[in-house]
Amino acid sequence: MPTFSELARAAYCPRQLYYARKHDDGEPPPETDAKQALAFRYDELRTADDATLTSLPIDCSPNAYRDALDTLADRPLWDDLCAPAETDYYVEGKDCRGLLHKLLAGDPPTPTIISPGEPPETGVWEPQTVRAVAAAKALAWEREREIPRTLVEYPTVGVVREVPLTTRRTATYRQVLRTVRSMEGPPPRVDDSRCDTCEYREECGVSTRSLKSLLGF
């Protein structure tokens, strides 16, 4: 049964997932933990001084970061983000499994995934969309009820994006799931701009850098 992170990787490039499995490379880079930990300090960091924020792995100025958290605090989900019902919650669904970084209380509950990277101008990156749908589907299977959305947190910039389970997003998730299930040998090479950020470039035959932050580990 594939994990959420495997599905996200396959959404970016199925061939990359093949090499990651081949090398048993599923661990995030060391700096990921420090970035994701920011998501559990929103209330504290909202009033932190410049020196404190400068010492942390945030991706904007201290003023911009405080402003972003002030904006986030105006949203109804603020209290639940700061005090989630569950953290590091493992869930196993019918088709996939993985870790929910937070599970927010509510009826229904809301799963959240924490990304160490930065978001696009709107929405979330497609690999994270697939991961978000996978998380909602797995939780829905466990709870035997519909889970209509997942949140993706970008704590290095103080932004939280909602991913509703639309028909289009669900279809993309199912296509990626089919691709992963049918994978026996190396899939066809993508060989485009995505290769520039792939750690398996040399083995695959093209040039790349790490893209784990994009995938939301």
Image (cartoon, grey):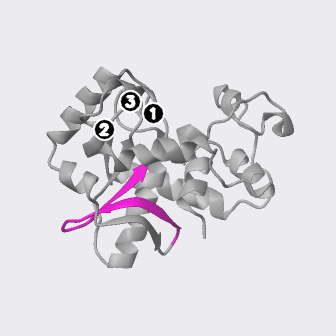
> Under tag 3, what secondary structure?
helix
Residue 165's place in the image compared with 215, above or below, is below
Residue 61's place in the image compared with 142, above or below, is above
The residue under label 3 is which amino acid type? Leu
Is 113 magenta? The answer is yes
Instruction: List x then y, in percent, for residue 128.
Output: 47, 46
The residue under label 2 is which amino acid type? Leu
The residue where tag 3 is placed is 53
Q: Report crowding for label 1: few under 14, some 14 to 19, many 20 or more residues within 10 A (C-alpha).
A: few
Mark closest to the chain's N terminus, 2 or 1: 2
Q: Residue at x 73, y 29 (%)?
A: 208
Instruction: List x then y, in percent, for residue 52.
Output: 38, 31
Front-most of 124 and 54?
A: 54
User: Which region of the structure is painted magenta?
Assistant: 95-114
> Under tag 1, what secondary structure?
loop
Q: Residue at x 14, y 39 (%)?
A: 74
Find residue 150 and report its image quarter. Answer: bottom left
The residue where tag 1 is placed is 56
The residue under label 1 is which amino acid type? Leu
The residue where tag 2 is placed is 45
Q: Disc 2, disc 3: CB below 8 Å?
A: yes
Residue 165's place in the image compared with 205, above or below, is below
